[in-house]
Image (spheres, rainbow, N blue to C red):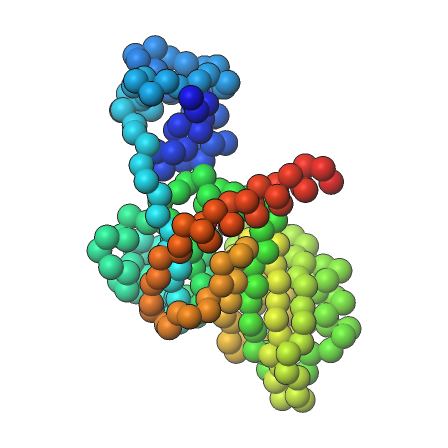
């Protein structure tokens, strides 16, 4: 028998944390009775409703998508810009991306109907690594790498000041340009571009090549491939390990 919050998460409407909020707010009923007990267990024959609407567990699917430049990561855009859903097959139109890439960035997006996994991979407290290959105009030095590791103050889209951090590994450096592997554990919008801008560089190419254990390998631009069950199992174990380590620290 699953806990009520896990059952709600298994319907795909939200994560377990959000399900706890819904339960506490009295928005969840089991067999017609409002339940506010967070540790409540659901039996197989029970009928669960959220905001008066019955919900049912669904099977989850997971896909890798190679986002090309020129598309925004949203389902609709009031400005009429092209979105990733213009490229995705109809059966994936209701799937959500795990995080975002800005319009001109390319690379890996994970798509799923598993709200719990989306929350685990994007929640700031869990710090799931995202790996990028970045090309900038100019020579990247050890001093720049140290500044990025120690933290650079940037302005968010909400006009707030935040300290952004990144781990870097120079791959190819000349006087005119540099290719750098960048690892982020934060999720600030346009973080990489803003950090390099503060150092006086322009980002010429930005491509995400890995998110947690999932990589871009074997994908062509605009292509979608299913993530195999074995990989999903490994990913979930990895996320649980990170969460446990964060709690211990």
- Nearest the camera: 234 or 63? 234
For the question of whether residue 149 can be seen, the reply is: yes
Task: Determine whether 68 is above or below 22 in the image.
Answer: below
User: On the picture, is 239 further left or further right than 35?
Assistant: right
Of all residues, the one furthest to the left in this rendering is 90
- Nearest the camera: 10 or 32? 10
The residue under the point 37% across, 72% down is 221
Question: Can you say which quadrant of the picture contains the N terminus?
Answer: top left
Q: Count numbered badges in the picture.
A: 0
For the question of whether residue 156 can be seen, the reply is: no
The residue under the point 59% across, 56% down is 129
Of all residues, the one furthest to the top in this rendering is 33
Q: Which x, y percent locates residue 4? A: 43, 22
Question: Can you say which quadrant of the picture contains the C terminus?
Answer: top right
The residue under the point 47% across, 32% down is 16
The residue under the point 60% across, 79% down is 179
Q: Which x, y percent locates residue 240? A: 57, 41
- Nearest the camera: 54 or 60? 60
Quarter of the image for residue 9 reads top left
Of all residues, the one furthest to the front in this rendering is 230
Q: Which x, y percent locates residue 121? A: 52, 48
Q: Which x, y percent locates residue 173? A: 66, 84
Quarter of the image for residue 29 reads top left
- Nearest the camera: 9 or 159? 9
Task: Determine whether 137 is above or below 220 in the image.
Answer: below
Of all residues, the one furthest to the bottom in this rendering is 175
């Amino acid at each position: 028998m699953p806990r009520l919050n896990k059952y709600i998460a298994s319907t795909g409407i939200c994560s377990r944390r959000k399900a706890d909020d819904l339960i506490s707010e009295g928005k969840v009923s089991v067999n017609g009775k409002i339940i506010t007990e967070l540790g409540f267990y659901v039996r197989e024959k029970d009928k669960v409703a959220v905001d008066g609407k019955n919900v049912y567990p669904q099977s989850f699917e997971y896909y890798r998508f190679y986002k090309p430049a020129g598309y925004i990561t949203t389902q609709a855009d009031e400005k009429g810009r092209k979105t990733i859903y213009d490229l995705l097959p109809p059966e994936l139109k209701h799937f959500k991306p795990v995080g975002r890439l800005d319009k001109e960035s390319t690379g890996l997006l994970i798509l799923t109907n598993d709200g719990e996994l989306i929350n685990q991979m994007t929640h700031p407290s869990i710090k799931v690594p995202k790996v990028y290959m970045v090309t900038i105009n100019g020579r990247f030095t050890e001093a720049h790498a140290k500044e990025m590791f120690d933290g650079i103050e940037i302005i968010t889209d909400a006009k707030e000041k935040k300290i952004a951090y990144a781990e870097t590994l120079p791959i190819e450096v000349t006087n005119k340009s540099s290719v750098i592997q960048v690892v982020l554990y934060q999720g600030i919008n346009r973080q990489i571009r803003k950090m390099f801008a503060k150092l006086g560089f322009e980002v010429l190419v930005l491509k995400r090549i890995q998110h947690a254990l999932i990589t871009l390998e074997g994908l062509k631009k605009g292509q979608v491939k299913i993530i195999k069950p074995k990989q999903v199992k490994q990913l979930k174990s990895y996320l649980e390990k990170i969460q446990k380590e964060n709690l211990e620290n």
